[in-house]
Amino acid sequence: MINKSGYKILKNVISQREIDVIERNYIKFISLYCADKDKHIAKIFKKILSKKGNEFRNLALLSLIKVEKKNKDLFYSISKDFGNSLIFEKIINNRKTNFILKNYFKDELPLVQKRNPVMLFNKKKLDRLKYEWHQESQFYPKHEMGLHLWFPLFRSIKNKNDGGMKFAFGSNRKDYPFVESIKKNGWRQRIPTINVEEKFKIVNIGLSRGDVVFFENKLLHKSDDQQNKIPRVAFVIRFISNGKKNRFNVIQN
């Protein structure tokens, strides 16, 4: 299924209890991380931990907007450094996740990059953190095989205009030429020179909290438009084959 379309959605991979734990640990991490960097932000996120349910989740998302506006360097740090947490191991070792990985890579077991998972943020009118059309294979040219696991935190994502992702169905057959650019204070872009939306059927991806989507290294994808005033937060975990068998390893960067 993945080989044909380039992606696979799995429902309820992360239990509600597990995703609650990840979300609360992320907010706790931000509070502690900012304690000696920005005491005001640290105090805001410490206070959020006293809340529960939707109030907790909405406050978390809205407070991330404040960090992004106030201190872009600090925001970048809290986007990537939580990925070092062992809390993501349950997702990596989940039965459904393992089934996909073993069937895709077969005897080529994947490497999990140490600098991932990384938090991806999509807010209305914030173009610098939106990805244009691209292939992950263009960022990992030495690795022929790769799967990427993407999932939302704090709220579910509708399948259109809610900050999710767009996939170009079946575009996972080959690498496409690209031009490179960097948005100011934003992500490096490697945009294909082909007209993606004319060449392929475009699929909008919507996910509930607890759902995940796997997509292949060569699948063309981009950030969807964001019309919701509540931002979208997602994490991505990258699995890259290095040709070694019978064990998981960690790329040290």
Image (cartoon, rainbow, N blue to C red):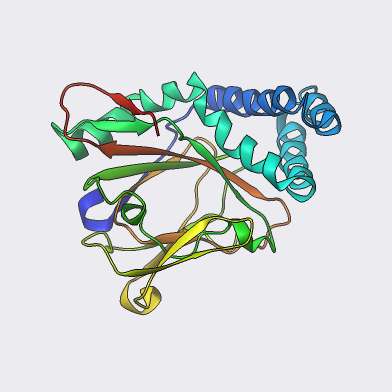
Using residue 220 as the reference point, say whether residue 71 is left or right of it. right
Image-quadrant location for residue 172: bottom left
Closer to the camera in the image, 92 or 154: 92
Residue at 50 percent of width and 35 percent of height? 210
Residue 205, can we see it? yes
Residue at 71 percent of width and 42 percent of height? 61
Q: Is residue 24 above or below residue 174?
A: above
Image-quadrant location for residue 168: bottom left
Q: Is residue 170 above or below residue 51?
A: below
Image-quadrant location for residue 125: bottom right
Q: Position of residue 203 (x, y in %)?
A: 41, 63
Closer to the camera in the image, 115 or 100: 115
Closer to the camera in the image, 218 or 39: 39
Q: Residue furthest left?
A: 107
Q: Position of residue 154 (x, y in %)?
A: 63, 38
Q: Position of residue 30 (x, y in %)?
A: 69, 29
Residue at 57 percent of width and 26 percent of height? 22
Using residue 124 as the reference point, say whether residue 162 is left or right of it. left
Using residue 101 as the reference point, say whether residue 155 is left or right of it. right
Q: Position of residue 41 (x, y in %)?
A: 81, 33
Query: In the rendered view of the protein, which quadrant contains the C terminus?
Result: top left
Residue 1, can we see it? no
